[in-house]
Image (cartoon, helix red, strand yellow):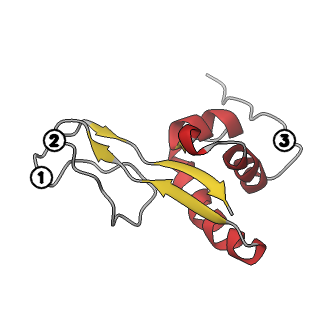
């Protein structure tokens, strides 16, 4: 099998992520899966790009707002989590049914 050919971009990955996140309203914050589809990168790469984007937004007076992940079984909210990836399991009930964090740019 041949390797898939990446889509041609007119902007960088991070500027495309920034644009996708700025268009999201408070109710429409985007998950890593939605961002990967919108920008054309793998879902695993989104977290790394978001970490860098968070730092580069500060000089512009913007910030990356994160709606925390939440356990679908017991309702535990991962408020203090610093990573942008979905947690593997809930510390309260050990369930792996977790709603992933969602992101948007505001400011």
Give SS at disc 2.
Answer: loop
Q: Which label lies toward us, 2 or 1?
A: 2
Labels 2 & 1 near each other (Cβ < 8 A): yes
Instruction: Return the disc, 3 or 2, that comes first in the chain's sequence.
Output: 3
Label 3 – label 1 distance at C-alpha = 43 Å
Q: Where is mark 3, residue-wise?
A: 9
Residue 52 x, y percent position in the rendering:
63, 67
Give SS at disc 3.
Answer: loop
Query: Which residue is drawn at the image coordinates 64% and 73% (left, top)?
Result: 55
Residue 79 lies left or right of residue 61; in this view the side is left
Q: Which label lies toward us, 3 or 1?
A: 1
Q: Which label lies toward us, 3 or 2?
A: 2
Q: Is residue 45 above or below residue 5?
A: below
Instruction: Return the disc, 3 or 1, that comes first in the chain's sequence.
Output: 3
Query: Which residue is drawn at the image coordinates 12% and 46% (left, top)?
Result: 94
Q: Is residue 20 above or below residue 5?
A: below
Residue 81 lies left or right of residue 42; in this view the side is left
| Residue 5, picture quadrant | top right
Instruction: Return the disc, 2 or 1, that comes first in the chain's sequence.
Output: 2
């Amino acid at each position: 099998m041949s390797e898939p050919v990446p889509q041609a971009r007119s902007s960088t990955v991070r500027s495309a992520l920034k644009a996708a996140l700025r268009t999201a309203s408070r109710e429409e914050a985007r998950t890593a899966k939605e961002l990967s589809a919108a920008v054309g990168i793998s879902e695993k790469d989104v977290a790394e790009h978001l970490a860098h984007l968070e730092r580069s937004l500060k000089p512009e007076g913007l910030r990356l707002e994160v709606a925390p992940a939440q356990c679908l079984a017991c309702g535990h909210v991962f408020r203090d989590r610093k990573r942008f990836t979905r947690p593997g399991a809930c510390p309260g009930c050990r369930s792996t049914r977790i709603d992933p964090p969602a992101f948007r740019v505001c400011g």
